[in-house]
Amino acid sequence: MLFRLTKPSTPPGVGASCLRKKFPRHVCQACVSICPVNAISLSPAGPEINDDECIRCGNCLFACPVDALQNLQPATRKYKNFSLVAPFSSVAPSVGELLMWHYLHRIRSVEMEIDNYPGWVEAVAALNIRLREFNAPVWQILSPQPKAVDIARRRLLPTNEVDVQSGVVACGRRARRQAFHGMSEYQLSLDTLQCMLCGACSRACPEEAICFTDGAFEFSSSICTGCLSCEAVCPVQSIYIKRLPGEKSVSRLPYMEKRCDCCQRKFYTFSPEADCCPICQRHTYGMREA
């Protein structure tokens, strides 16, 4: 054969927005942890996808907090009314994907034989735990409807397949935050005694969930995807993100401007009692005295 009649598909990969590529100290391994066949591994350059091992399940797409996965598509699934229906993938979907089906298509059940798809049963159970955290209606697993033939239709389709549709859902934690914008999945904890108010966390946050405005440190929980970039760049490890579902909120911590008694430079602090800037506090023997 002298040439190919079809263009080979572009192999899956990880783009430049990957947190491990942007921040050398980042410890994100969301895609690695969720891959059911261990097709994603970590290298000094960041995550790498083995094209031969990847089964294109799309689970990694829903786990990545910054939509860094490339040349992959979410699975196409069939649904009727408010139920997902057969055929079902051998690899169960992630909770992140099912949450999007819940919101975008108002799916509330799965029609399947429980004994045939144990992975799906576990996925629905995990989904229901998350839905209860959001105070949302849970899913049910229903027995498949018996197939009856409608002889009035030319193609003699089973009547329970007439209204079956196919579709995909938007993927990624960002899409999930937009869908469930009234709720938050993560909360921030800040050690105000250690924080230097350097602003690194705000500059690193890809969602702009952290900002400094009107003399206050502000955190918007509803748009935080839990990417942990703020933790990765904090020079004094004063900031922590933890998974804590609840209603969305905006936290404000006022700070003030003061002048350092040691170096006479301006600095910002949460404490009215602070007399020295964070840098001078870490120097000994008056090394920075004016």
Image: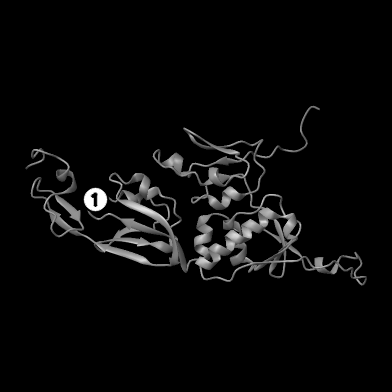
Q: How many labels does the image show?
A: 1
Tell me the quadrant of the picture where the N terminus can be found: top right
- State whether residue 7 is above or below residue 149: above
- State whether residue 48 is above or below residue 56: above
Residue 69 picture location, percent across and down? 56, 45
Image side of residue 58 versus residue 197, left or right: right
Image side of residue 11 versus residue 42, left or right: right
Depth check, front residue: 54 or 213? 54
Q: Pointer 1: what residue? A: 194
Residue 221 picture location, percent across and down? 40, 62
Q: In which quarter of the image is residue 112?
A: bottom right
Image side of residue 284 versus residue 143, left or right: left
Residue 225 picture location, percent across and down? 46, 56
Which residue lies most toward the left here? 290
Which residue lies most toward the front here? 115
Identify residue type, mark 1. Gln
Q: How crowded is mark 1: few (under 14 residues within 10 Å), some or many (20 or more)?
A: some
Residue 175 picture location, percent across and down? 53, 59
- State whether residue 122 is above or below residue 46: below
Tell me the quadrant of the picture where the C terminus can be found: top left
- State whether residue 32 is above or below residue 101: above
Q: Is mark 1 on a helix, strand or loop?
A: loop
Image side of residue 227 versus residue 203, left or right: right
- The residue that appears at 61% across and 61% down in the rendered structure is 125
Q: Quadrant of residue 186?
A: bottom left
Q: Which colour scheme is used?
A: one colour
- The residue that appears at 62% across and 49% down in the rendered structure is 58
Which residue lies most toward the top here? 2
- The residue that appears at 14% across and 54% down in the rendered structure is 274
Depth check, front residue: 236 or 15? 236
